[in-house]
Image: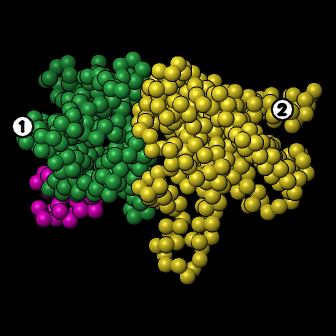
Amino acid sequence: MIEFLQQLINGLGQGSIYALIALGYTMVFGVLRFINFAHGDVYMLGAFAGFYLGPKLLRLFGEGPSYAGALVVLLVAMLLCAAIGILIEWFCYRPLRDRPRLTVLITAIGVSLFLENGGQFVFGADPKSFPEIIADRAIEIPEAWGSISGLTITISQLLVVGVTLTLLLVLSHIVLRTKMGMAMRALSFNPVAAQLMGININVVIAFTFGLGSALAGAAGILTSIQQPSIDPLMGVNAGLKAFVAAVLGGIGNLPGAALGGVLIGVIEALVVGYVSPTYRDAIVFAVLILILIFKPTGLLGASEREKV
Amino acid sequence: MMREHSKLYLVLACLSSVLLSSAFSGGAAPVIPPLNSYYFDVLIGLGINVILAVSLNLVNGYTGQFSLGHAGFMAVGAYTSAWLTLSYGYALGAGALSTTTTFVLALLGGGIGAALAGFAVGVPSLRLRGDYLAIVTLGFNEIIKGVIQNAEPLGAQRGLGGMVQHTTFFWTFACAALTIYVVVNLVNSTYGRGFLAVRDDEIAAEAMGINTTKYKVIAFVLGAFFAGVAGGLYAHFKQFIHPEGFNFMRSFDIVVMVILGGMGSTVGVCIAAALLTILPELLRFVARIEALPDWLQRVAENRMILYSLLLIVLMLTRPQGLFGARAAVTRKA
């Protein structure tokens, strides 16, 4: 029982990361109806932004790791990733807005390959050790807590889940309570009608890319706090799994993406704990295939009719 | 007119394969030709890439089902045929069948194994379209790799070695010619009209009474079959195969060939496969030129940076590829 709970906790930490990345996939799919293959690589760039800027920014807050410094690192990485996301949309996807979806898909694959290989070129292909921006340690739950004593939770896991929840609240505020959020929802509901109502779709799409990429950047920093080894190809697997999470929750559905991310993280942790770590990647794709066959709309998604 | 075309391909392909094989080796004997083994390596790789690209073009180009998992089927073919020759090859070879016959049977077995995998993958996933299909096939590629990594009889993480080098110029280019022949003839047949109809407008094709699922599965299974044959050739050429050699990066390589050549153009795809096999080798030489600035040498070493830029620029300026017909891709899927 304790072991099961421990796996759940580990899965929750990883699942929060997937959830943050999955939100970016789902938002872009919502407004543009296409899958931004390069999204996982933006997450990688977030981690590398932290790697290069982290030590410099931390020094502004005194010696050693500090929470204020970590927060600044997180915000700077988010801003940088938002800028990168907007640039990618501007240069690669905007000129293709009216082209067939296949053309856009191939371009997205191209952008993804470019970021991965460009990353290997600029940062070097070998894994890097992420600087310690917070003082991480494990907390063991004491005997006095009865049946759940013996569980260990690390500070970083608590932080990751906490920051993810905060970001989710901020995101839901933006999407549900602001004008820009309303424009995003209008665009995903019906792009033509949204345009007729005076919504500048270029601005809204750029904003969506920025928002999604900022979340991916945050995920990049948060994952590096938990597992401080980063490399230019780290976005490939994380991106694919986050995509599976988005589909599992129902693509285009924001709460679904968060739920899917957590579920994928937990499923993965359980497979690693109880079956075999080598099946870790295969099982996630098996989930994807099962969901696409039996419930293609995902857990929370609504079905969409194709008009001829 | 169409039939003339396909005959021309066949004659050309056969001629080149016979010429090459007779020039460098001496028929079907499994010997390394008296040619610089570097060129031998590159040319065999070229032939295998042509098979892979032409067969993927049947699925991605002619039928319009964007698959990203071709390396997975190649893996199934490579492992099946290697397993066949390793466990039965010597027993049979010593008895009634010659080594060449065993090799051909193993290639066939690899193709059939991959075709079965293609059927198993295609039936559930071909109900999906566009982006979803791309990711599901990519997922299947990873699943196939994962299964091999966990299969002890296939060497698991260590890879599988010990195959005899049966693959020659003759077999490689004969298989390439056969692939081109089958694909070109198929596309120009009634089935081919079905493939094109599915690609151009699936809903209209269905309204016209075309069983779209059937056509998609046929294209997928055939594509997988030839990928399996290519895998068999690869396994008996390199004599060592490893699951990581069939990851989705390998699939991307093949997809780039198809896109560069122009989806739905067999000639274009052949040329692109040849170009993209030779290009990295040329880049290797460029990287060695001392006079060039350091960063340029490093770019030349990393061909994937160039490939990815090529993809983006191609999609922005010429989405139909170098040799593709414009109409083939401008229709909305």
* Magenta-span inclusion, residue A68: yes
**Quarter of the image containing the N terminus of chain B?**
top right
* Pointer 1 local density, CA inside 10 Å: few below 14, some 14–19, many at least 20: few
How far from the left and from the top, in percent, is residue A32? 28, 41
- Please, is residue A176 above or below residue B126 in the view? below
Say whether residue B160 is left or right of residue A182.
right
Q: CA distance from mark 1 to mark 2?
A: 70 Å
Residue appearing at x 63%, y 24% in the figure: B116
Q: Nearer the viewer, residue B21 or B76?
A: B21
The quadrant holding residue A261 is top left
- Colour in which chain A is shown? green
Residue appearing at x 32%, y 47% in the figure: A97
Eye-nearest disc, 1 or 2: 1
Q: Which mark is residue B102?
A: 2
Q: Label the yellow chain with its letter.
A: B
* Pointer 2 local density, CA inside 10 Å: few below 14, some 14–19, many at least 20: many
How far from the left and from the top, in percent, is residue A249? 28, 27
Q: Can residue A25 be seen in the rendering of this structure?
A: yes
Label 2 is placed on what type of residue? Thr
How far from the left and from the top, in percent, is residue B34? 86, 60
Q: Secondary structure at mark 2?
A: helix
Q: Can residue B139 be seen in the rendering of this structure?
A: no
Q: Which residues are magenta?
A: A46-71
Q: Nearer the viewer, residue B195 or A114?
A: B195
Q: Which chain letter goes with mark 1? A: A
Q: Which mark is residue A177?
A: 1
- Please, is residue B250 above or below residue B282 in the view? above
Label 1 is placed on what type of residue? Arg
How far from the left and from the top, in percent, is residue B79? 67, 34
